[in-house]
Image (cartoon, rainbow, N blue to C red):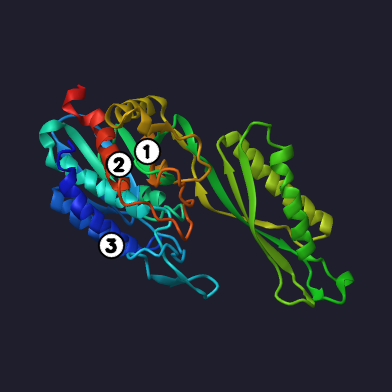
Amino acid sequence: MLEGLAATTVWQEELYRHLHAHPELSSHEVETAAEIAARLEGFGYAVERIGGGVVGVLTNGGGPTVLVRADIDALPVTEQTGLPYASAVTTVDESGATVGVMHACGHDVHVACLLGAAELVAGRTQAWGGTFVALFQPAEETAVGARAMVEDGLTTKVPRPDVAFGQHVLNHEAGVLGTQTGPVLSAGDSVRITVFGKGSHGSMPHLSVDPVVLAASIVLRLQTIVSREVRPGEFAVVTVGSSVAGSKSNIIPDRAVLLVNLRTYDMGVRQTVVDAVERIVRAECEAAGSPQPPTFEYYDQYPLTDNHPEVTATVTEAFRAHFGQDRVMELGRVTASEDFSRVPDAFGTPYTYWGVGGFAPGHPGPPNHSPTFAPLIQPTLSAGTEAIVVAAMAYLGKDQR
């Protein structure tokens, strides 16, 4: 299946540089989607646009259906890699400031790898049977892309897969793969909490209910949730990423806004944390004499990514047979979050999600979302492409039956 990899690599590396230099933000992946669709059609796939994403379906006789997903959006991050193909694209953020747009999470790698695998699979139809589905998802970074595709009829427009795969480039050694049974990426919830005070002149605090003090009390108390309400040994994170109130030193404002992020691996623990956040905020507001109840707006909610044991075992065995034992490691749990699982969950399909290293040996790269995140082009692209093909052929390959 991989005999044509050298020829694929030629255009794949060029495409990767182009994607990296021309990133598009979540839900605005117009040119990226057009490029993907044109490539898939050229490989002989039946192509559909669904929920802002692109799906290519290649049916080759009877057999299982395998779905592989890649995310395609970029981030509002100003690139600092110094690469000759660095992004010069900019956008205006919510505050009106100009910031860069960058593939700081490696989604350009994901697109290039899946397109390369799609070409290789299409070029060796005599070696496999079944259906290969290449799904390119928008808006992963805002947690709305997978849901948008499902709501646009994904499960009725695409054959139901027997198994689904996802992969992500990480700051590990390039060419090394990591697999993990069970929970691998945490569930994530962001919460915008607004607490209300009573505005006043800064010299007259006795006439106010100060939301700055109220917010400070809440921030401190929220830190007790993990240490005092979550069972030792269970994983949970409660991060207050933003606390904003007021605009002038001598004005006590009438409200404060907190942005809180939650990460958990267990849905019971998640509910404990959510309940605790709301209980603490309401209690502190009551203690402060807040004139009205707080509001809670949940957004950027990511499901748990929970790898199926049998599927993970099959893929891990195939990786070890192809790459060798020393290039396949146990990934461990990664505390970041993804919306990939919404796709297989909508079909009721088992799945596994693995990591692909992208940095020089002995020199761990910067974390995803860093302005200096720049995976090595090779062997990262080749390893990611081979991984997809090897995993797919573990189910589609004629020698597997």
Q: Which residue is drawn at 47% across and 55% down?
A: 369
* Residue 331: x %, y % from top left: 45, 35
Q: How far apart are marks 2 and 3 (CA)?
A: 20 Å
Q: At x 12% / y 36%, what residue is drawn?
A: 125
Whole-angstrom CA distance, mark 3 to mark 1, is: 25 Å
Q: How crowded is mark 2: few (under 14 residues within 10 Å), some or many (20 or more)?
A: some
Front tag of 3 and 1: 1
Question: How many neighbours does mark 3 have within 10 angstroms: few (below 14), some (14-19), or many (20 or more)?
Answer: some
Query: What is the spatial separation of the Cα atoms under label 1 and label 2, in whole angstroms?
Result: 8 Å
Q: Name the residue under label 2.
A: 383
Q: Name the residue under label 1.
A: 176
x, y percent for residue 313: 37, 25
Callout 3–callout 1 Cβ contact below 8 Å: no
Q: Are marks 1 and 2 in contact (CB under 8 Å)?
A: yes
Q: What element carries label 2?
A: helix
Please tell me which residue lies in front, 357 or 76. 357
Question: In the orientation shown, which residue stands out farthest toward the right?
Answer: 206
Give the secondary structure at mark 3. Answer: helix
**Res. 263 image quadrant:** top right
Check the picture and name the quadrant holding the C terminus: top left
Q: Name the N-terminal-most of marks 2 and 3.
A: 3
Circle 1 Cα neighbour tier, 10 Å, few/some/many (<14 / 14–19 / ≥20): many
Snapshot quadrant of residue 1: top left
Residue 128 % position (x, y):
16, 32
Amino acid type, mark 3: His
Kindly tell me whether residue 45 is visible in this rendering: no
**Amino acid type, label 2:** Ala
**Amino acid beneath label 1:** Val
Q: Residue farthest to the left?
A: 126
Q: Can residue 226 be seen in this view?
A: yes
Residue 18 is labelled as: 3
The mark lying in front, picked from 2 and 3, is: 2
